Image: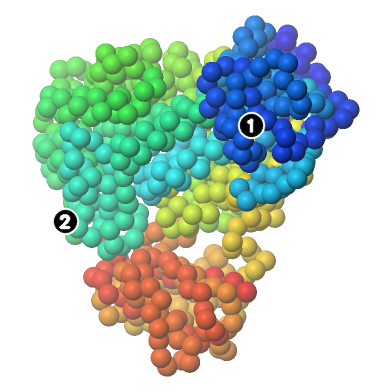
């Protein structure tokens, strides 16, 4: 604490030039600059040259890196792992002088963090993959830096909306750039099973990794009537894990049970309890909880864990335990009998099950992580890590019970939440803007930093499929930058005005250069679709189905994002909706959106999306419109039409929004 205070004093009161995020513990500017040209090489002092090669690629140096040798002539970048006794794990020192750059890590993790600090010193226009330069300069600085918390995580849900391996590796790069070191990979849930397993090929071959069409897993969130989703092959998982290791990121896979298991239960319904079947009006079995009594279930879990542990060589496996509906166990005669014998309720049964699964992991030399509900019903083995997500009280309770705790209360750390009242996104956790994230203090009152293992942000992907690939960037940044600083920088570094200025002046241009979208303080800054490009020409909406008096068709053409049109019944095959412009409109793109604004429910689809340039003849744009679609007109548009070709969307109505039209 004394060292931290002294180092903090060096930093405080100085402008954060050149605007690093997260802020380093100590940074001293020095006169001069390092001039980088094609003659500069990247070298390392140890035989593992991976990181030297990585930095060389990021700087677009074509010459291969080599092992460092003393007496080397000319300018250079030297990477080293030194056992700095005065630095904690992942600490590093960075010294930029006029003739050299030396990055020295306390360990390999510290070296990775130091490399990414150096990359933030590089001018933003050097960062893009297509950058070309003769020379550029880096300011001379001396930095001593280390993390506040050992665990700096991000939870990414790929079950509700699938992101391919390349997309996950892009996320890993973004995490490493901000010194995060854990990816909590939410691989299984009600909406999808994303892991290829040799022992259970039906999970992918029969479609638990997909939704809709012939898959037994229905589209709860997704494109109605169309097969959607995907899974990671074992080869892809190993590739992602290897890339994460390079970037000092440990992947914590989540096999979510006993709840959130509808996808696997549709393939193996025998894992469910005896008792009543919970079905929708359409006959879809909505049950999603493993029976806690069947011994064959534990045999199956053992086999799944064997393959997961083989794919993920790190120590920790997350086994869920959240949001377990009690009704399925309460109506199961076997589970009810077990609860009576043990004198426990459904919360206690959840903890009992998690203890059995934890023992399986410990036999394999692994530790267990669970959601905070898993410890509501009794004592879980003390080696377990608790992800406290519900609120700040859940964090404090887990700490009080003595668990290693990850603070991730949804009211501060869930980035699928809205950033302002008028924006898309979910709101059950509150309105969460960047300042709210930055001013969050994760350590419960009355405790020190060592009370918690770390902090974790989260992105749940009900909204991702609906809003497109840039939506995740927009939701994450710069909120993730703010949380990264809370995870890394000392607690005393919490000046919103200074951070906001540093972010806007220095860091957001870096994100743009790296091709990362983000939300500026006045709205979208780096997204293909920006509010300043929107136009609102006059048009009318009509259809074959009446709308409610409260939500008429005119609501889908009134220019407001807060209103919508709602039909009186579900759209059936042959039903249609038409958008007619008062005057033909010239534009670059038109996006048709249906369903809820944040989650793809009450959609129109499957349907045929058509455009008319003369008001009479139509051309097909998309013959499998699922809920939203964008057309890029060849000339002025007169009409747009949606014609339904399916048999309902599984809801009692459909919702239509204003068209999004770009200049």
The image shows residue 212 at horizontal and vertical percentages of 26, 57
Q: Residue at x 26, y 13 (%)?
A: 363
* Residue 446, numbered label: none
Q: Residue at x 65, y 9 (%)?
A: 84
Q: Residue at x 18, y 40 (%)?
A: 201
Please name whichever residue, 99 or 256, is drawn nearer the observer in this view of the structure. Answer: 99
The image shows residue 245 at horizontal and vertical percentages of 47, 27
Q: How many marks?
A: 2
Please name whichever residue, 520 or 48, is drawn nearer the observer in this view of the structure. Answer: 48
Q: Residue furthest right?
A: 31
Where does label 1 land, which residue? 116
**Looking at the image, is 267 positioned above or below residue 363?**
below
Q: Quadrant of residue 297?
A: top left
**For residue 335, side relative to residue 135 (left or right):** left
**For residue 99, side relative to residue 301 (left or right):** right
Q: Quadrant of the C terminus?
A: bottom right
The image shows residue 244 at horizontal and vertical percentages of 47, 31
Task: Name the front one of labels 1 and 2.
Answer: 1
User: Cα distance, mark 1 to mark 2?
Assistant: 53 Å
Q: How is the image coloured?
A: rainbow
Say which element carries label 2.
loop
Where does label 2 land, which residue? 283
């Amino acid at each position: 604490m004394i060292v931290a205070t002294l180092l903090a004093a060096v930093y405080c009161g100085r402008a954060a030039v050149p605007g690093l995020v997260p802020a380093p513990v100590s940074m001293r500017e020095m006169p001069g600059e390092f001039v980088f040209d094609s003659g500069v090489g990247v070298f390392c002092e140890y035989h593992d040259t991976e990181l030297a090669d990585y930095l060389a690629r990021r700087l677009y140096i074509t010459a291969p890196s080599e092992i460092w040798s003393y007496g080397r002539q000319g300018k250079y970048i030297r990477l080293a792992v030194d056992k700095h006794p005065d630095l904690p794990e992942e600490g590093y020192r960075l010294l930029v002088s006029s003739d050299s750059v030396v990055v020295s890590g306390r360990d390999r993790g510290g070296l990775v963090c130091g490399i990414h600090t150096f990359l933030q010193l590089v001018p933003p226009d050097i960062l893009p993959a297509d950058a070309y330069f003769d020379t550029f300069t880096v300011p001379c600085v001396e930095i001593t830096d280390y993390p506040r918390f050992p665990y700096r995580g991000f939870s990414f849900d790929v079950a509700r909306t699938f992101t391919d391996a390349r997309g996950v590796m892009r996320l890993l790069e973004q995490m490493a750039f901000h010194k995060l070191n854990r990816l909590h990979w939410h691989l299984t849930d009600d909406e999808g099973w994303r892991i290829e397993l040799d022992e259970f090929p039906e999970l992918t071959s029969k479609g638990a990794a997909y939704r809709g069409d012939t898959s037994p897993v229905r589209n709860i969130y997704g494109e109605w009537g169309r097969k959607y989703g995907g899974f990671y092959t074992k080869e892809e998982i190993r590739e992602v894990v290897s890339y994460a290791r390079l970037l000092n990121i440990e992947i914590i896979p989540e096999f979510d049970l006993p709840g959130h298991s509808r996808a696997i239960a549709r393939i193996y319904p025998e894992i469910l309890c005896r008792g009543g079947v919970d079905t929708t009006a359409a006959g879809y079995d909505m049950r999603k909880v493993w029976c806690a009594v069947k011994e064959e279930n534990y045999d199956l879990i053992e086999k799944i864990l064997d393959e997961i542990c083989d794919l993920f060589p790190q120590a920790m496996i997350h086994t869920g335990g959240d949001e377990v509906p009690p009704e399925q166990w309460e109506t199961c005669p076997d589970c009810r009998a077990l609860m009576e014998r043990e004198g426990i309720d459904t919360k206690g049964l959840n903890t009992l099950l998690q203890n059995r699964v934890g023992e399986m992991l410990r036999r394999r030399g692994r530790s267990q992580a669970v959601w905070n509900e898993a410890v509501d019903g009794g004592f879980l083995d003390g080696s377990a890590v608790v992800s406290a997500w519900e609120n700040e009280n859940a964090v404090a309770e887990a700490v009080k019970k003595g668990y290693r705790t990850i603070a991730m209360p949804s009211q501060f750390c869930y980035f699928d939440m809205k950033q302002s009242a008028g924006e898309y996104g979910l709101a059950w956790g509150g309105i969460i803007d960047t300042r709210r994230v930055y001013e969050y203090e994760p350590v419960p009152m009355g405790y020190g930093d060592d009370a918690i293992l770390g902090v974790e942000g989260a992105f749940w992907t009900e909204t991702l499929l609906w809003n497109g690939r840039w939506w995740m960037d927009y939701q994450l940044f710069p909120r993730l930058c703010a949380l990264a600083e809370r995870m890394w920088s000392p607690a005393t570094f919490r000046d919103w005005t200074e951070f906001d200025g540093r972010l806007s002046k220095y860091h957001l241009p870096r994100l743009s250069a790296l091709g990362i979208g983000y939300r500026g303080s006045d709205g979208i800054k780096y997204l293909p679709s920006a509010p300043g490009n929107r136009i609102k020409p006059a048009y009318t909406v009509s259809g074959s189905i009446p709308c409610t008096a409260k939500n008429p068709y005119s609501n889908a053409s009134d220019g407001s994002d807060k209103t919508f049109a709602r039909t009186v019944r579900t759209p059936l095959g042959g039903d249609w909706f038409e958008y007619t412009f008062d005057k033909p409109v010239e534009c670059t793109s038109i996006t048709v959106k249906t369903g809820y604004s944040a989650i793809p429910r009450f959609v129109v689809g499957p349907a045929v999306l058509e455009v008319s340039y003369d008001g009479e003849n139509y051309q097909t744009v998309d013959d499998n419109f699922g809920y939203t679609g964008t057309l890029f007109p060849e000339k002025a548009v007169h009409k747009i039409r949606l014609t339904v070709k399916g048999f309902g969307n599984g809801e009692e109505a459909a919702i239509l929004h204003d068209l999004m039209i770009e200049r």
